[in-house]
Image (cartoon, grey):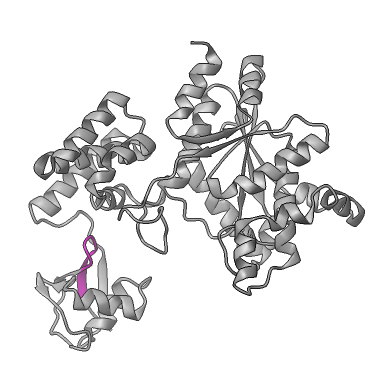
Amino acid sequence: MNDSQAVLTHLGRTTDQIFGRTDLIDRLASGRPMRIKFGVDCTAPDLHLGHAVNLWMMRYLQDLGHVVVFLLGDTTTRIGDPTGRNQTRPVLTPDEIETNAQAFLRQVTMVLRDDPEVLEIRRNSEWFGSMSIADLVGELGLVTHAQLIARDMFKARIREGQEIGVHELIYPVLQGYDSVALGSDLTIVGSDQLFNETVGRDLQTKHGQRPQTVITSTITPGLDGGAKQSKSLNNYVALAHSPSEKFGRLMTLQDDLIGAWARVYTDLPDAVVTDLESRARQGGASSRDAKLDLAEAIVARYHGSVAGGRARAEFTRVFSGHGLPDGVPHLTVPPTTAVLEIVLAARPELSRNAARRLIADGAVSLDSAPLRDGDARPAISTGAILKVGRRNWFEVVVGP
């Protein structure tokens, strides 16, 4: 097997489609380091395991000497990528964009190497900030209205009577031009970005460049087996989650997804993945142990084998031995506080309706006694243990 084929085989484990395969093979065979475009708009970042599939593919290529160009879309963020939206995105301030950019950098370097030889950080304000109106109009003239309006999402908006801003229509052209400006050889994206990146291929050809290869990566269902991982559905595992939080969330994964998640989100050998899949099908203790192995492998990939083993031991102690996790945070609660207000103080990210649902479902307890009435004002004392949901404990401190 030649080197190019070895790379394709490795990437194939998490690849959905390749557009420009011949170009990729030729570039790999040339021995020249490829420039791999990794572009992000600087909206609020909360990267999860699904996003990291692309990062791990790029990390593999970095280890072979190829260069990832991490492109912060500080200009395009002000426009807003319409992908997956049925309405216009809000515009962020420059300070918000910069804050989000730094958060992105912290998360992606959990996977990507940050050596300057294999990671280049750019911002598209470098070219869009100095582009003249005449030059911009010239770029727009290379793409037709029919090409842009053919997007399913725009068709759906028109059908539903939703407005489409002109700035949204030109967004794919701007993202495509990023590939021209960077001289991109390859980009690895989710399938939702395929349209924008194929516009990039077209623009590169019209600028006399060899078009970039576009690889779309495998997408799995979320933890609950429904849609792909999403913060709004709370069926995801975030890169920013602690080892114990990652482990706990992974243990909620549906059994029939253990094999798929092992294949996509770990680097375990294929034989081990097949074994996990087989044990998951057996159900009962075999399935539980397979899930423990999977969770430990994923945590270890991001935090090291020691952290993976520690997270497994803590999970087993807490959920099998009915113990408490280490480092339970304190929660200061005024005396005679309503249960609903206690829950919102402990979990401020919850809406009042979500908090009431947890209470009604019996998911809130004080010293193991369920609190089912959100308006009740229980007698509480310092040192009591409050549990909110499946994996959130707090040691109560009564105070002002």
- Which residue sits at x=9%, y=51%? 320
Q: Is residue 88 visible?
A: no
Q: Nearer the viewer, residue 204 or 241?
A: 204
Where residue 128 appears, as percent x and y from the top left, is 79, 52
Where residue 394 appears, as percent x and y from the top left, is 22, 67
- Which residue sits at x=64%, y=55%? 151
**Is residue 346 rendered to the left or right of residue 321?**
right
Q: In which quarter of the image is the C terminus?
A: bottom left
Above or below: residue 177 compared with residue 273: below
Above or below: residue 228 compared with residue 53: below
Where residue 26 appears, as percent x and y from the top left, is 65, 19
Q: Is residue 110 magenta?
A: no
- Which residue sits at x=10%, y=45%? 284
- Which residue sits at x=54%, y=50%? 104
Magenta segment: 388-397
Q: Is residue 132 visible?
A: yes
Q: Is residue 394 magenta?
A: yes
In the displayed orientation, state which residue is furthest to the right: 134
Q: Nearer the viewer, residue 346 or 132?
A: 132
**Is residue 108 rendered to the left or right of residue 128?**
left
In the displayed orientation, state which residue is furthest to the front: 159
Where residue 250 appears, as percent x and y from the top left, is 28, 48
Helix, strand or loop for the magenta stretch, by majority: strand
**Is residue 88 rendered to the left or right of residue 173?**
left
Q: Quadrant of residue 355?
A: bottom left
